[in-house]
Each structure stands twice: as C-alpha cells, then as structure tokens.
Amino acid sequence: MKTALVTGGSGAIGSAICRALAAQGLQVIVHANRRLEEAQRLAAHLQAGGASAHAIAFDVTDREAAARALAALDEQSPIQVLINNAGVHDDAPLAGMSGSQWDRVIDVSLNGFYNVTHPLLLPMIRTRWGRIVNVSSVAGVIGNRGQVNYAAAKAGLHGATMSLSLELASRGITVNAIAPGIIASPVTRDAFPKETIEALVPMKRAGTTDEVAALVAFLASEQAGYITGQVISINGGMA
C-alpha cells in the first residue's frame, strides 16, 4: 500500500483530495497546522470507511519541525505520493500590502513547498516511484488584483514544478501542478456571488472540490505516469 501525504488536508480542497486518494486504496496522512482536530475527524471518517488514514500536525514554514515530522513518517513507510496543498491568502493591493502580508503568503506556499518536499525526495527516489502534485491557483497563471503576493508564490511554484520534474523524470517520479479557478467552498462563498462567477467563468458556475480532487487523484495514479512538468488549469474556461 502506497502512502500519501496531503498538506493542508483539513481544508475544503484538501479534505476532498484525502477522500479521493483513500478511495484509490492509498494510506492517507492528513496534515494540518492549527486545525489538528479537523484533520483527526477526517482521518477517523476515512478509517470508518475502511481506509488507512491518520492525522499529523506541523507548521510547513518551520523547516526544522517539518523535517522532524517527516523523518518520523518515513520511518513508518516511505511517502510516495505528496500533495502540496497548504496555502494561505492575505490579500491587499501591493501599494497597501505590509511586509508581513507578503512574507506570510510566500512562506507558506513557496517555502512550505521546499520544507516538505526536500526531506522526502531521497526516500522517494530510492523507491523508484513517486507522484508530486502541487496545488496552485488561477492567480498564478493570469494574476488577480489584490493578490500580488499569492500570485507570485503560485507562479514560483509553477517554475519549481517544471524544474523538479526534469530532475526526477528518470527516477519514475512525476511532478505536476494544478491551477484551480473559483472553487465552491466556505472561503469563496462570500467572495464570489453568483453574478460575479457568471461574469468571470465561461461555464457560468464554480467548480467543486470533488472535481479538483479527481484531477489530483488521476495525477497521483499509475495511469498518469507519462504526465510530468505540467501546470494543468481546472477553471471552467477562464483565460
């Protein structure tokens, strides 16, 4: 049984990804930072359905804490599927954006990618099989007002995805990113009223977390073994 780690697994998209991977027969590690109880509830729900799952908490921006937590996980079972889903928003026009707002978003999305991925690479390489999926955003593809920090972090993740895919292609490990658009969740419900979605999205609706999770699950599967170095948009046709 292969083991998958989903960072930010207690959130709306992260929990859908955990459910989809568990349905494929993977052992799922549900990661959280401050929301460990939610991650534990999700893990218990997956276990009740017959899946192998457990929860873990650490701050992806704390390099030493992340390394300790990941080393402990690797002792139990090598992580062969890594979903880098942790991310935060702290929006403001750049002219009014504080340095702490810039640093926090970059730290979680981009430095967090390094802090989690780096310790897992050599163990994954030794297994000669792996799937790394980085969850990005449409903001990293086309930009968004008030999200210069977030767009910069996600665009950086795209470059990291393509470069790392070249380093790992001969090792049986694929590296891809997905870039969701407007996805229905508690976070987006107030930010994107129906009329705004209809104006922005050619398909005239928000996507679902299950649609995002299905794409991630495919990229994590055996069937996606010849797809690597790609940034795949899932956004209802947004340019």
Image: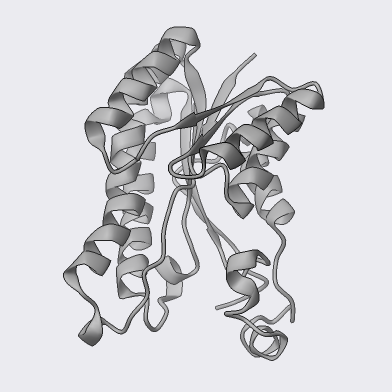
In the rendered structure, the answer to whether residue 27 lies left or right of residue 74 reads right
- Give x and y (percent) for residue 217: 66, 39
Please give the count of numbered marks on the rendered protein: 0
- Give x and y (percent) for residue 14: 59, 46
In the rendered structure, the answer to whether residue 224 lies left or right of residue 73 reads right
Give 85 or 158, whichever is nearer the viewer: 85
Instruction: Give above or below for 130 relative to 211.
Output: above
| Point 33% across, 80% down: residue | 92
Residue 69, quarter of picture: top left
Instruction: Give above or below for 137 relative to 95.
Output: above
Query: Which quadrant is the N terminus positioned in?
Result: top right
Give 58 or 178, whichever is nearer the viewer: 58
| Point 70% across, 72% down: residue | 206
In the rendered structure, the answer to whether residue 141 lies left or right of residue 62 reads right
Query: Which quadrant is the C terminus positioned in?
Result: bottom right
| Point 34% across, 43% down: residue | 113
- Give x and y (percent) for residue 54: 60, 24
Instruction: Give above or below for 198 relative to 172.
Output: below
